[in-house]
Image: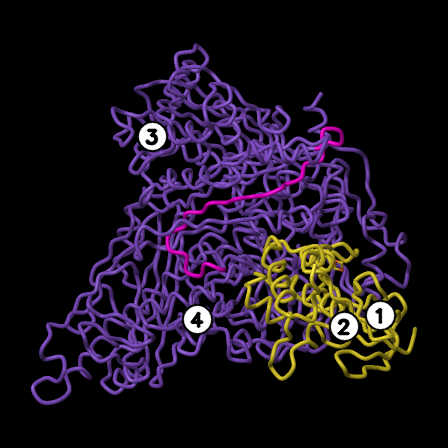
Chain colours: A purple, B yellow
Amino acid sequence: MSDIKPLWTRRRLLISGGALGLSQVLKPAVAQAFNPDDVMPIAPGWDNADGTDLNYRIDGYAKVTGAKLYARDVRGADMAGWPDETHHAMLIFTPHAKRIYKGLNLSALAADLHPDTIVTADDLDKAGLAATGFFTTDLFCKPGSVPLYLSQPVAMFIYKDLITFKRAQAALIGSDAIIDYGAAAPATSTDPYGANRFTRVQGDSPYGPDVFSPVKDGWVGPLRYQKNHSPVWAKEDIKGDVSQQASAYGDQIRADLKDGKSGKLYTQSFQTQSIDQVFMEPENGLAWYDAATGKLSLMLGVQSPLAILNAVGNLVKDAKASANVSEVDAHFAYIGGGFGGKDHTIVPLYIAIAGLFGGGKTVRLALDRFNQFQFGLKRHAFEIETQMGVDPDTGKFLAFASTMSCDGGGRSNFSASVADVGATAATSVYYLPKSDIEVTANQSIGVTAGSMRGYGTYQTMTAMECLMDEVAEDLGKDPFEIRRQNAMTTGQLNLTGNAASGAMRTGEVLDAMEASDLWQNRAAKKAAFEAANPGKSYGVGVACVMKDYGTGADVTLGSVSLSPEGKITAACAAIEMGTGVSTAVARRVSEYLGRNADTVELDQQDLWDALKLETSGDPFGISQADQDKAQANPRWVPAISSPSSASIGASVSSHGPAQAAYIIMRYGLWPAALSIWSEGPLGGEAAGQFLTFDKLRWVDGKLTGAGMEPLPLEQLAARAHKDGLVTGAMVHGFNRWSWASATFAIGTDDLTTAIDALAIQKGSDDWDLLNRKAIDYPPAKFERIAVNYYSACGAVVALSADKISGDVTIEAVHQVLECGNAIVEDLVSGIAQGGIAMGIGHALHEYLPPFEDGPGDGTWNLNRYIVPKAGQVPVWKTTLEILPPLSETDPPKGMGEVVMIPVVPAILNGINNAIGARVQSLPATPEKIREALK
Amino acid sequence: MTKLTMTVNGKDVGPHEVPDDLPMVDYLNDTLGLTGTKFSCGIGVCHACVVMVEQPDGTITTRRTCIAGATSFAGAKVTTVEGHAKDGKLSDVQQAYVDHFAFQCGYCTSGFVNAGTALIERLRKAPVAKSQVEDTVHSGLGDHICRCSGYVRYYEALRRLILTDPTLTKEG
Ligand code: FES
Ligand code: FES
């Protein structure tokens, strides 16, 4: 594209390496059918009368009445200003990656089912469209070449007529008859997507300083890859550079383990499987390209709006006249499940292409479930080879070495990062004085793997928890005793050489698990069960993990406004994945404003214009010098927004609105209250007290403190507006394993708090953008920390195994969770229960063959991929214990991911307890159980 | 092609010229604009697409709309998730689900609303023993897939609703 003009400069996002100059506008979802009011219950009732508690989730009414919320619900006619006529697009995928793709052969499709438009690689070339940046790939396989991976698209078909489209779609399920292939050819094989070595040697103390660690000395990658693509690590030299030192220390750790110098050696080979996310709403979206104006409009359901906008911007940035996009206008709907699979998905690029080739009509690209299995992002399968040295007398862990790899499939996505996160979580909740982990994210011809709930840690911590059980059993130790003995305590350094943020409460989690009825009465329950169920063995397994949350570049954008009538509007840049972030935001505001927000808006990117944010550089890789230089610009932030995930909804997304609410309380309501309390001769009721901000308390929705007359929010809001006090605050915050903090002058006061950009509103004035007086960003090298924030979760699982069939039934689960202050406990427990069901699926049922027989062949659906239904979940026998926070000022912790992990190793440990044999390869199918029973 | 008429949420719809192979979910979504009925697996496994159908004798059954042609509903009285709340007031089943935080993303919810309601209607005609309530809930909801919730809160919500309405259970 030759002439991109920043049409709406105020809304332009300056993103280095992104779609510079492209006007990008994020709007709330469907203009006509979806506005903030639609997600509010039509009948009052989601919260109580005075707004101090809630009855149900803020989007509950809309969801339970079938309101249009999801991208899948929307057609052109629903979108204000779009063409009513909706055309339908489908992708044609190839199930082969070891044959030459010759081209399409439409004669295999009935003539009346032929598409109106076909888009191929050649058409993209002609139009100057290409996927670049994070998504760099051949969007369509070119005739004459070998498909890069199983399921690589070869073409897009667009139909004007829904019925014809539907018939063609049905005719093509599981069939590649319309694709011509040539000769067999070698599969594409490239170097890995990434590899790293994490080596740590403790110094005199587990609390540091270390002799050597990634945080202290830097991260280590391979020098190069061999012909077979395995990494070549530096030659060991204890006095050499960081890579050579890592090799020296790491090799020594491995040699000592082998030679018995690190206690008794335990070895483990463990495999985890490829899994489909099975979010219930398959990926889909709408696009409309108006050639006259150059505007490409999109309706999408993704977890990472800004990343997708950038990707679409990159797609069109060199486009020719036929796709001369000058503006991308994207709407982001609620999503019907994501679990990571709608973060940095490539599907929206195809949706954009559908619009660009849609002849000026609205085009809908909606994957069906076969397509979703065939093309959607998968969970990475891991191969893990571990050696661990243990003092046989004390049970103390002495050294840990592991070589692990994961399969990223045929297109680069988050594989390198998943590998690193998995590796750095590999020892789970336990302290190891010496560790050496080599991890590689491999390319293959498999369907692309990406982000998924658990993000590598589900795989590696499951392995560790099983190894833990094996060691306990071998040494004749109680599984809780050995866990307590090795559990990392507050201040001890993790695998990267960093102390976790906050107190480690693993011991309390273990105590609660041990005290559970399932554990305490396991012998009696086993005896009773087996007497009543001959042929079945009963077993109990335990596991405890702590999952990091956050990414090292997390952003919060929050805004709160108070009307003169006391109505609170909160906004937050997050996607509602179902975890209840909108409800959490409404509640979190009440911490400072005494009651829930009346309205919550999500995804209103243009709302943040008042902050005039600018960014440059990669927040993960920026150098300290670049950061120091950039931060002199008061508008600069390391990243403008970040994707939504299950873990950071409460902890990160609600941080911004909470900060904004605090600022209104501190600089609006507090002076308003003081002025009301001081009215009257000689200073009114306040005169006899020394009133300070910290004495303020909300009681029954009214502000009081130090014996002052309780004041309703309406009265305070009216006074704040009348006196021109702060009635609105908009903030941006950035977290790199620590919150950035900045100082702003508000009136005569200097406020230092955990945000890096602030605009305030006084009375009914416009937003007033404040320059920060001082800024303290987490050092660039904090990127090395890799993990810092943790929440802990343990599971006790009772199960039975049929000794003939090998069928395993989960009889009961007791889960213990430590998550700081749970903002809405009902939401937390719901997410935890969902995590347990997902964990059961992963442990026992869910499996995708990696290559030719796998989902890339287009024949997979829920008839053969088993997602647990209620019958496979102990619905009536699932209990959850949430540890109370240490104090009411504990932050809420990310818990959406950790809650699905411990149940998996607890099931594997329970199987061993029941049948006396270990399954080391997931899922534990009846065949594997029968094999183990032999 | 069939000239199709039916009653959806108490309103007569059609006649529409509909081919015999058009799935009911597409007819609801694309012809009637009722998108509360969700497509997920398309092969009859997940039950996200379930609607209620009133039989001539007044009994309520459920049907999966992804594997049933729209024309197979000719003349039927169909209720979709959009047809339960009246004047902004949720039905008992809907209220039970929201009160109990039963769902998260909500994509499966319309199926659970219809299945739960059909179950309650069944119990109105044939109450079950209190000791059978848990199995009864499972008989009504057990075919449905929800990836977010682990089912616990859907089940508990319906159990509570059944146990608090004395007309739905009998002693035992
Ligand atoms: S969409 Fe109909 S059963 Fe799954
Ligand atoms: S609530 Fe998301 S699938 Fe059920």
Specify the label residue A11 is tagged with. 4
Q: Which element type, helix, strand or loop, lies under badge 4?
A: helix
Residue found at x 10% / y 84%: A683
Residue at mark 4: chain: A
Contact (Cβ within 8 Å) of mark 2 with mark 1: yes
Mark 2–mark 4 Cα distance, whole angstroms, equals 38 Å
Which amino acid type is shown beneath numbered disc 4?
Arg
Q: Residues within 10 Å of mark 4 (few under 14, many from 20)?
A: many
Q: Number of callouts in the render?
A: 4
Mark 3–mark 1 Cα distance, whole angstroms, equals 64 Å
Which amino acid type is shown beneath numbered disc 3?
Ser
Residue at mark 2: chain: B
In front here: A671 or A24? A671
Q: Are marks 3 and 4 on the same chain?
A: yes
In front here: A126 or A271? A271
Residue at mark 3: chain: A
- Which residues fall within the magenta stretch? A802-826
Specify whether residue A672 is in view.
Answer: no
